[in-house]
Structures are given as C-alpha cells and as structure tokens.
Amino acid sequence: MFNLILELISFPEISFFVLILIFLKLARLVAAFPVSWGLSLFNVKVFIMSVSVLVGVQWGDEGKGKIIDVLTKDAGMVVRFQGGNNAGHTVENGKEHFVLHLIPSGILRQGVPCVIANGVVVDPVELVKEMNMLTARGVDVSGIQLGTRCQLIMPWHKLIDAFREDNAKGEKKIGTTKRGIGPAYCSKAERTGIRGIEMADAARFEKRFREEADAYNKMYVPFGGEKLDVEAAWKEVSAAADVLRPYLTDTVVTVNEANRKGVHVLLEGAQGAFLDIDHGTYPYVTSSNTTSGGACTGTGLAPRTISCVWGVLKAYSTRVGEGPFPTELDNAEGEFLRQKGGEFGATTGRPRRCGWLDAVSCRHSCLVNGVDYLAITKLDVLDDLDEIKICTAYRIGDKVVTGFPEDVYDLNRVEPVYETMPGWKTSTTGVLAWNDLPENAQKYLLRIAELVDSKIGIVSVGPDRAQTFRV
Ligand code: IMP
C-alpha cells in the first residue's frame, strides 16, 4: 500500500494534486485562525476567502458577544447578518460591562468597521440610543455601516408585536421580546416594508412612513389595536433618520470588497439555531434564519466565501420565552444554574429557563450549521457540581431516539435520557490553557465534542475577555 502511494506521488500530476490538497487544508486552518496563525505559519499574509461565521447552536444567550469580541482581535470587519434589537450581547472588556442589541460586538475593538447588514431589521430610534450610549462611554462609533437594504422596524411593528402577544392565549403565546421583530420581517415578506435606503431622502421617507402608519391605524385599531399617534411617532423616527443618514452604506459592496482585499470578515449571528425560523422549534422561534446559511442571504456574500463556522455552545442549556425545552430543570438544580450563571435576559430581564446540556439537539444544530469549531462557554458555572448530566437521547413513548424530532408535538413529550459525569469541584475561572483544566472538566468537554461531532476551538471560563483560551 505504502509503495503504491509512493509510486502514485512520483507522477508529477498526482504530486501536484497532493500539494494542492495540502495547501487547501492549510489555507482552511489559516482562515479559521487568521492573522496570528497566518503570520506564524508562513511569515506572510495568506488569506483565502477568509470569512468566518459565528452562530449560537442552542436557544441563544450562549455568550456569542464575548466570543465575537475575542475573535475580533484577529478580524478586519465584523458584520451582523440577521435579527434585530431582540438580541442582547454582553461583553466585558476587562474594565467595563457592555450590553449591545444591534451594533456588532466588534465595536469595542478600536478601528474595526462594524456592519449592520441587509438581513438585520433595524429600529432607527433604538439604534441611535445604542450609538449614543456607546459614545457617552467613550467608544468610537464612526466605523458603523448601516445597510441600505436593511428593513426598518417602525413604531407600528412594535404595537402589532405587543397586540398579538398580549391577545394570544395558552400555547399560541411565543413569548416574544415585543421589539417588533416578527411584524417587521412580516412586512418584508408582504413587500410593504420600508428599507434603510428610503431614509436617504427625507421627503420620500415621510411619505412612506405616513402611508404605512395610516394603514396600521385603519387595519388594527377597529380590532382593539393601540392607536398610533402618527405625528409624535414621525417626530421621533425622523430625528433618528437624520442621525443615521451618514451611516447608510451599500454594505453588500463594502463587505464583498473587504473579502476580496483579504480582510478577515467575521459574520456575527444573533439568537441560536433552535430559534431559526426554518430549523428551530417552530412556531416558538424568532423570524429570521439564525443558522449559518442565513449569513449569505443576510450579507450578500456568496456561500463559497465562507471558510469557517464557529458554533457557540454554552456548557448547559437555557431558553427564554415559550416552547419545548427537553432538558429543562424546574427545580433547585435549575435555580442553581440560573443564579450562578446570571441567567436573566440581557434584553428583557426575564429569568431564563435552565437545564442540562442537550447533546441531541446540539448535534442536529452543529450539522445544520456545518460547525467547524465549537466555542464552549460558561464552563465555570458547573465548577461546584458533584455530578453533571448530558442528554444523549430522547425517549418518546417506548422508543429511544437520537435524532432531533422535527415536530414540537413530539419535542414536548420527549423524556431526556441522561449520561452522568463526575464534576471537578475546582474553580476553573483562572485557567488559561487546556492542560490546566481539571481532568473531569476535560473529559466533560471532550464528551460534548464527541456527541455533537465537532472540534473544540475555544473554551471560556468567565465573563471577561481574558478568561478565554484556544484549544
Ligand atoms: P422575537 O425574536 O422577539 O420575535 O421572539 C421570538 C422568540 O425568540 C422568543 O421566545 C424570544 O424570547 C426569543 N428570542 C429572541 N431573541 C433572543 C435572544 O437574543 N436570546 C434568546 N432568546 C431570544
């Protein structure tokens, strides 16, 4: 066999082919760990289609903000591609604590252009508030690019969201953030939405605003919807539009140009795989594609440009809002995770539902996302536990399944099948290298990687930037 390989390699065409394969493999490594790895490997900048996507592989709140902040150190541009100000990305930069809803977490690293791309729904008033908050705290927001194709969240979208949610009964409640996200995506699909570019011309924007605001009052008020005070709403929205006008950019062009120039572009997802409108626990989902595929439509980058997918996975599970959650712990253990992990919504302040890690669902979402590397967060929250459970299968009636059911009806009645692992009972908050982790913590992480069929790239052991190491 060995001789045969040697003989084959002696053919120039075949050895050239082998060289190409090795080069592509190395290029992929460089793309995943750009700049520093690129330089140390070759001492030259080698960038090939260096676009990475970062997504949550659970129900959101995995700690994506912190990992984006860490990866931004090696990025030349950070791009948010879906969702809106329903997200709450928390970042601690060693001195301060920031919660961002719309602006990419990369804004906290000086000089990195931060793009809000076309897949995002943007509430102009809330965006201006977030920019003002950052400016007041000394953060430079001049590098923000607001996509001209973004759909705008308008005041009536928020009223519709609240109206539907407050009037929904029992299992019809989704538990939305009431930020107008769903109704804004609805307007996009109905083709009545207003896009960022329409703010460029104040008179055109006002006409569109008044038309749609009047349509809302005609359609919803007779059925009990809150009447929109159009004048007051226009005053607030037009003031925000005046601030945002200079930031409007054809981001499809700027993001593609950056990629062509070899800038490492980091695409930042919000929420998590099981809130994806197609792949999540429908209908208990948000209204956008939160999985990695959404990064292409949400930015205008072609699929072939993406070289690496980071899946952020919390070392246990949480969910906010309604919907199935197989490993939920409605007991003292769940309360322990909530308190120790600070599991309260960064956007709404709602207590998050907590439970053990669900490897069945995570394996499915790693598959859908095509996760190359996992960033496992909040390992330290488990430091004090005697035993830790991982759900490895679901029991449905008398059947045990390891695939993720596509129907919430089944998901609501699955019983988790657990594997129990010993805890490590040692603080990991100061650990900065894999070899310094307690053995049982290493075993827990490796078991997760094995069950979800992905490699570990980063481990996070606390909220601060510094409490993170590469594997
Ligand atoms: P919406 O996105 O506000 O329409 O809410 C739909 C569902 O997604 C609700 O269950 C929300 O709690 C959930 N959701 C939306 N954004 C986030 C997030 O950033 N983290 C966790 N859950 C979220």
Image: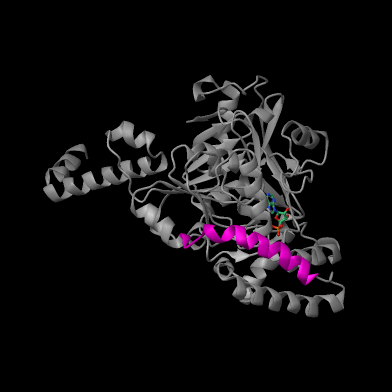
Left or right for 58, reference 34? right
Locate residue 214, reporting x and y percent. Answer: 75, 78
At 56% from the left edge and 61% from the top edge, which residue is drawn? Answer: 245
Q: How is the image coloured?
A: one colour
Bounds of the magenta span?
229-251
Locate residue 201, reporting x and y percent. Answer: 56, 71
Q: How many numbered markers are drawn?
A: 0
Left or right for 258, reference 290? left
Q: Nearer the viewer, residue 394 or 284?
A: 284
Q: Nearer the viewer, residue 214 or 117?
A: 214
Q: Is residue 230 above or below residue 461?
A: below
Locate residue 108, reporting x and y percent. Answer: 55, 39
Locate residue 251, reporting x and y percent. Answer: 47, 60
- Is residue 85 visible in this depiction of the protein? no
Quadrant of ligand 1: it is: bottom right
Magenta segment main secondary structure: helix
- Is residue 353 visible in this depiction of the protein? yes
At 72% from the left edge and 65% from the top edge, which residue is drawn? Answer: 235
**Which image quarter is the N terminus in?**
top left
Within the image, what quadrant is residue 406 found in? bottom right
Left or right for 434, reference 190? left
At 59% from the left edge and 43% from the top edge, which residue is drawn? Answer: 64
Within the image, what quadrant is residue 35 found in? top left
Q: Is residue 358 magenta?
A: no
Q: Is residue 234 magenta?
A: yes
Left or right for 171, reference 301? right
Q: Is residue 114 above or below residue 226?
A: above
Q: Nearer the viewer, residue 168 or 456?
A: 168
Q: Nearer the viewer, residue 213 or 63?
A: 213
At 80% from the left edge and 63% from the top edge, which residue is drawn? Answer: 162
